[in-house]
Image (cartoon, rainbow, N blue to C red):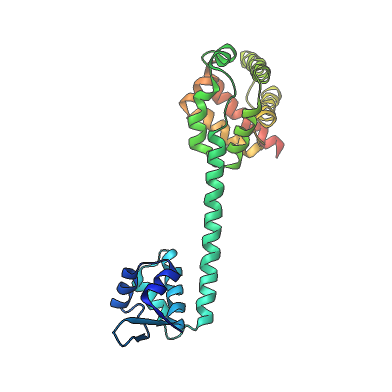
Amino acid sequence: MEHSVGQVAGYAGVTVRTLHHYDGIGLLSPSGRSHAGHRRYEDADLDRLQQILFYRELGFPLDEIAALLDDPDADPQEHLRRQHALLSHRIAELQRMATAVETAMEARKMGINLTPEEKFEIFGDKDPERYAEEAERRWGGSDTYAESQRRAARYTKEDWQRMKAEVSSWGERYHALMEDGEAPTGERAMDLAEEHRLHITTWFYECTPEIHRGLGEMYVADPQFKAFYESMRPGLAEHLRDAINANAERQE
């Protein structure tokens, strides 16, 4: 069958001007002309156009598309295999992008579900959302970050009060062991480091010993996190980091 340029443009969802351009550069020339000189496209031309539009959708420039389609060593089956491989790769990329966007959307709408008054009542000047920007910068988009946000969004005022009480009790006991001169490699220090790790696992996400090691380094290197632990006792950030490492070795 023969088709006019207008019909082909309608079939393919492109403009007549685009088809004229493809003809002008030799990418897609119609197989025939009418008596009046109008372009007439055959079914084989439509097949070629379909391949052109496929490669264009994947971002190929027109000169590369021409080289692909005019390759004397490539048969139609080879084009189909190549297109299938490219599509599979594109689908996988789009799925990864969609997952990342969904995670970002989910994380954005989650957070500490408290009024400003309740936050001040519970945390005072130690509002945990002060650290949210740094946490998102480091871990945003990860499964761990999403899980932490997901759990935090469910907690009530009473949950946060209980969590704060646990942290306060832990801080007092860690302060005491440092007062007693306990080394980071001592049993008491390692036990409190393990309690710290389990607190994170219970309230936020699965904190493995290896993840805990990374957190320990961050508590020393990041000014905001270091200030939080140093407010419990000067030198606590470094002491805790070393206790975390010792406990991780003990766990391993």
Q: In this view, does 210 lie above or below 47?
A: above
Residue occupying the far front of the picture: 36
Q: Is residue 192 above or below residue 9?
A: above
Residue 77 image-quadrant placement: bottom right
Of residues 178 and 29, the one drawn nearer to the viewer in this rendering: 29
Residue 201 image-quadrant placement: top right
Image quarter (top left, top right, bottom left or bottom right) of the C terminus: top right
Res. 234 in view: no
Q: Is residue 122 above or below residue 71?
A: above
Q: Where is residue 55 in the image (x, y as percent from the top left)?
A: 44, 69
Q: Position of residue 170 (x, y in %)?
A: 66, 18
Q: Where is residue 80 in the image (x, y as percent from the top left)?
A: 53, 76
Q: Where is residue 70 in the image (x, y as percent from the top left)?
A: 40, 82
Residue 111 image-quadrant placement: top right
- Left or right, 166 with respect to 9, comes to right
Res. 156 in view: yes
